[in-house]
Amino acid sequence: MRILFLSSYVDPGSGASILLRLAKRLQARGEEVRILTTNSGYDSELVRSALLPPGIAAINRAFNKLVPNYFSLAWFPLLKEIRKFNPDVINIHWTHGTTIPIQLIAKLTRTWPVFWTLHDMWPLTKNTPFEYSGGMALREQPLTLKKRLKKRLTLMPDLLFDYKVRTLGSAAIHTISPSKWLQHKAMQSPVFRSAVNHHIPNGVDTDIFRPLDRAALRKAYGIGEDQKVVLFLSARLDDQRKGFYYYAKALEHLREVDPGLIGNLVTLLIGKNSAEASEYLSGAAMNLGSTRDLATLVEYYNLADVFVSASIADNFPSTSLESSACGTPVVAFDVGGIAEIVLHNETGLLAENK
């Protein structure tokens, strides 16, 4: 079978690792697989980029400032590459960011079976990956002149959403939702009123994500046997949706009610700005930065007594799956599909959002 994956995100250090694992496993089974992307810099035997000439690409970027995540001149090189590969089936993953135009998706359904894996709520919303009111921040993010201009120039979200409904509402699409929560949202959405909606949860490779010798690891990292270790992991620790603010405030509260525990607790911070983020934490912190090495990531999960997922909006986070596979319980806000991963009082604890 010739399987084409279409995705704007293919960075292995992001959630796109889900897509890459799936493609490689299908390839190992003998299927003919291609990943087609609008992002540059990731070309390989498996991944191909459909790029515009430099001058047109500059015009396209300017156009996408006005109507982000909806329209793109990438339609032409994408369609050319798709026809050249001539797949038996197309599986779409991310379309926003380096935009894959939604009108192209509707066109593809007239020729090929199209499955769209929903990793967030962007296909269902006006123009945001998740519908939430926003979270508190430890530091104010200044509204720069560039951000103000972009906000003013962007077309009305209601008009864009109406366009999305008109374009995709009658298309013969199959959606795949990793969580039952998101499948229910898709079934209720006018965007997918003609779609067939499937639920297929993501998994993790338990040959990689598995329990290790925790005592030996702690000795190697210089962590005492009696210390309590909490893991906080995010691509960017200043992403308000990931809820670092709420973890920092929880530690402040813990200092008041149990100062002895705080004195014995160390937070492992993984992600960009970890050194800066640690300044806001009560108790000790180890700033381990970002990593794309899976073996190192597995060590981090195994070092911890508990993994904190403080996201205030999410779908089916891989980090919680990975932590559970390593035998490390998860504490999280009960949002999105997290309750389908964390069984309250069995494999972790769930709290009311925020």
Image (spheres, grey):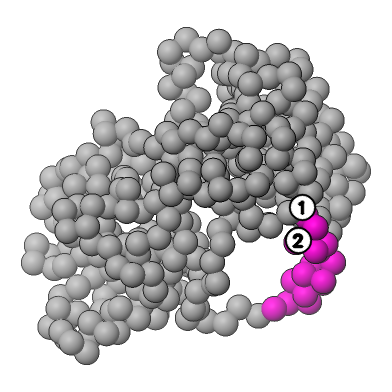
Q: Residue at x 67, y 28 (%)?
A: 172
Secondary element under disc 2, as helix, strand or loop, is helix
The residue nearer to you, when weighing 8 against 287, is: 8
The furthest residue to the left: 226
The residue nearer to you, when weighing 63 against 11, is: 63
Q: Which residue is mark 1?
A: 162
Quadrant (top left, top right, bottom left, bottom right) of the N terminus:
top right
Q: Which residue is mark 2?
A: 158
Circle 2/circle 1 CB separation < 8 Å = yes
Which disc, if any, is residue 70?
none
Q: Residue at x 73, y 26 (%)?
A: 108
Q: Taking 317 as reference, is 166 left or right? A: right
Q: Position of residue 276 (x, y in %)?
A: 45, 74
Secondary element under disc 1, as helix, strand or loop, is helix
Q: Residues within 10 Å of mark 1 (few under 14, many from 20)?
A: some
The furthest residue to the bottom: 256
Q: Position of residue 110 (x, y in %)?
A: 74, 22
Q: Is residue 299 visible?
A: no
Q: Residue at x 8, y 67 (%)?
A: 226
- The tally of labels here is 2
Could you tell me the amino acid type at mark 1? Asp
The answer to whether residue 19 is above or below residue 350 is above
Residue 131 falls inside the magenta stretch: no
Question: Which residues lie in the magenta part?
Answer: 143-160
Q: Position of residue 80 (x, y in %)?
A: 80, 22
Q: Taking 219 as reference, is 241 left or right? A: right
Could you tell me the amino acid type at mark 2? Asp
Image quadrant in which you'd find residue 310? bottom left
Quadrant (top left, top right, bottom left, bottom right) of the C terminus:
bottom left
Q: Taking 189 as reference, is 19 left or right? A: left
The main secondary structure of the magenta stretch is: helix
Q: Position of residue 306 (x, y in %)?
A: 22, 60
